[in-house]
Image: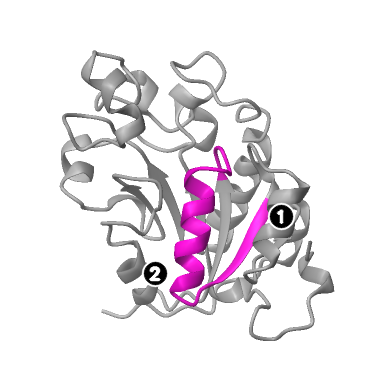
Amino acid sequence: MTHWRQNSDPFLAPDLGRSALLVVDMQVDFANGGTAPIPGTSAVLPAIARLVDAYRESMAPIVHVVRLYEGDDVDLCRRRVIAAGLDLVRPGTAGSQVAPELGVPVLDPGSLLAGDLQAVSPTEHILFKPRWSAFYRTCLDDHLRRWRVDTVVIAGCNYPNCPRATIVDAGERDYKVLVAADAISGVDARHLEEAGRIGVLHAETDEIVEALQPPELEVIS
């Protein structure tokens, strides 16, 4: 288990001045009262909101990554219940929206499903992912490269599924990865220890907010 303050490897050290915050699957259906609530997701919302506010204040990049289930392009393990009519993050439903605590506008499902980024502000966007990883069949890597991002901070819903897949794919693309350990549901000490074996570090939200500096990023046109 490697806390970022204990890291001595410069190749892994997060550079928050060149970081982007990835908020994964923080949608109404996965919070308390939703169609498929994930334990602990509502509890981490305040920490995620603090991270989002800090990144907004610093004008550093934020990407809210969402799931939208429609038609046959659905994970195999959920295809049966979606085909049977379950309204789980179905496009246009209240449950598909980003949790209101994060202050994100209503989703534009047509644009998102077409693979486009939905702008919240010049530095904040929403992205649809069709499977577990935020990098799979999306423009996320291109978007981050345009911002010259070299570090991703991961927060959101249900570490064992989409956040973990996103973390692995980020590492395979040579991004430095920092898990906001108290801003992600479903994570435990063993997960953090295992992630540390592939160079993933972790920190608490307050530490990240305190260390966050105005971005050193330059958008490539």
Upstream in sequence: badge 1 or badge 2:
2
Label 1: element kind = helix
Measured in 3D between alpha carbons, the distance from the residue under mark 1 to the one under mark 2, in whole angstroms, is: 24 Å
Residue at the spot of label 1: 192
> Is the N terminus in the top left, top right, bottom left or bottom right quadrant?
bottom right
Report crowding for label 2: few under 14, some 14 to 19, many 20 or more residues within 10 A (C-alpha): many
Please state which amino acid type lies under the numbered disc 2: Leu
| The magenta segment | 156-180
Residue 111 visible in the picture: yes
Residue 89: % across, % down: 34, 26
**How crowded is the residue under tag 1: few (<14 C-alpha within 10 Å), some, or many (20+)?**
some
Q: Position of residue 34 (x, y in %)?
A: 47, 17
Callout in the foreground (1, 2): 1
| Residue at the image position 35 percent from the left and 19 percent from the top | 94
Left or right placement of residue 217 versus residue 130 in this view:
right
User: Identity of the amino acid at label 1?
Assistant: Leu
- Identify residue for label 2: 144
Is 215 drawn above or below residue 25 in the view shown? below
- Mark 2 residue element: helix
In front of the other: 128 or 77: 77
Q: Is residue 106 visible?
A: no
Q: In this view, does 5 lie to the left or right of 55?
A: right
Percent position (x, y) of residue 133? 40, 52
Q: Is residue 192 magenta?
A: no
Q: Quadrant of residue 214?
A: bottom right
